[in-house]
Image (cartoon, rainbow, N blue to C red):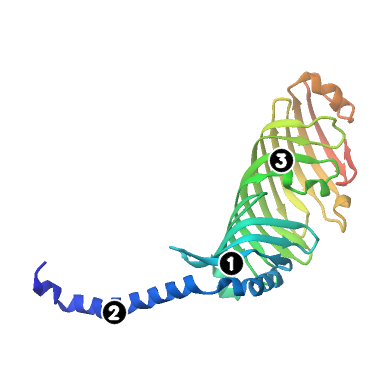
Amino acid sequence: MTATALSSPALRRVQRVGIPIGAVLLTLLFVAIGFPYDRLRDVVAAKAGQALGAQIRMTSLAPAVSLAGPGVAVTGLAVTLADGRQLAIEKARVRPAWSPAWLRGRPALHVDVEAAEGHAVGTLVLGAEPGFAGTLSDVDLAKLPVAGMLPGLSLDGTANGDVDLRTTPAGPRGTIDLAAHGGSVALPGLPVALPFETLTARAELSDASLAGGVDVDLQGPMLTARLRGNVGRAPVVTNAPLDLQLQLAVVDPSLRPMLAGTGLRLAQDGSAEMRLTGSVGRPLLR
């Protein structure tokens, strides 16, 4: 490159502007690295807990820099929800999210969370009705509190999927779409857990129903089943009314006597189609 090129007006403008900007950015980076984040740990935990309506404790707070913007890295995060449930989060990365929620005066954060229950990445919107929209992966179904929804129900396996949920005074609202592989499900009244190869579940939580548009499909070596319909609302979950259609086909003949003991009426080919009514706590097959 010639001396004339090096002294061109364009290059001089770049030097006048670029060098000061680079110095400022480097200064901010060194300040961020040296900032005493641990001193803010308790303050941040208190503010976050207030925004989410939960009690939050964390072990450490440190800077995290990415191409999408600056943020913080948290380890040893313990969350106690308003209903008493506790979540232990191994580590999390949080930064401001590129979200239109900011234009509505609602802070939005991009979160990347790893916990014993699984991995979640998405946008957390704060405010009067906090919500989360994103993807879930490696969710440990055995650690989910499903027994509180239906006594005698338990799941095993791992799941992936998408959720878009928000918290309202009347309860959670939004959509759930999950797919699990290589696990099992235990149902009330059955003495053995049923293994499955695939299990998909979709539902919408709305003002009209606790779970509307329910669509659960199970494919396993012992039976296949499809459950569709709605679960209504009630002050207590176990009293929520059911309006579901059940279709199943027995693959393993040894399962027939157990199913017959629950009141299921099977056709000669091992299939059945019936309506599930009653309530979550006292389901009735017709």
Residue 272 at x, y = what percent? Answer: 80, 28
Q: Earlier in the sequence, mark 3 or mark 2?
A: 2
Mark 3 residue type:
Val
**Location of residue 257 in the rendering, given as x and y in whole percent from the top left corner:** 86, 22
Among the 4 quarters of the image, the one containing residue 256: top right
Rounded to the nearest angstrom, the CA distance separating label 3 from label 1 is: 40 Å
Dot 3 or dot 1: first in sequence order is: 1
* Residue assigned mark 1: 61
Give, as a three-letter code, the residue at label 2. Val
Q: Name which residue type carries label 1.
A: Leu
| Gap between marks 3 and 2 measured at Cα | 59 Å
| Nearest to the observer: residue 164 or residue 156 | 156
Q: How many marks?
A: 3
Residue in the picture at 69% in, 29% down: 220
Q: Position of residue 52 (x, y in %)?
A: 70, 68
Q: Residues within 10 Å of mark 1 (few under 14, many from 20)?
A: many
- Which residue is disc 2 drawn over? 17
Residue sitting nearer the eye, 124 or 88: 88
Lower position in the chain sequence, tag 2 or tag 1: 2
Mark 1 falls on what kind of element?
Answer: strand
The residue that disc 3 covers is 216
Q: Name the element at disc 2.
A: helix
Q: Residues within 10 Å of mark 2 (few under 14, many from 20)?
A: few
* Residue positioned 29% across, 79% down in the render: 17
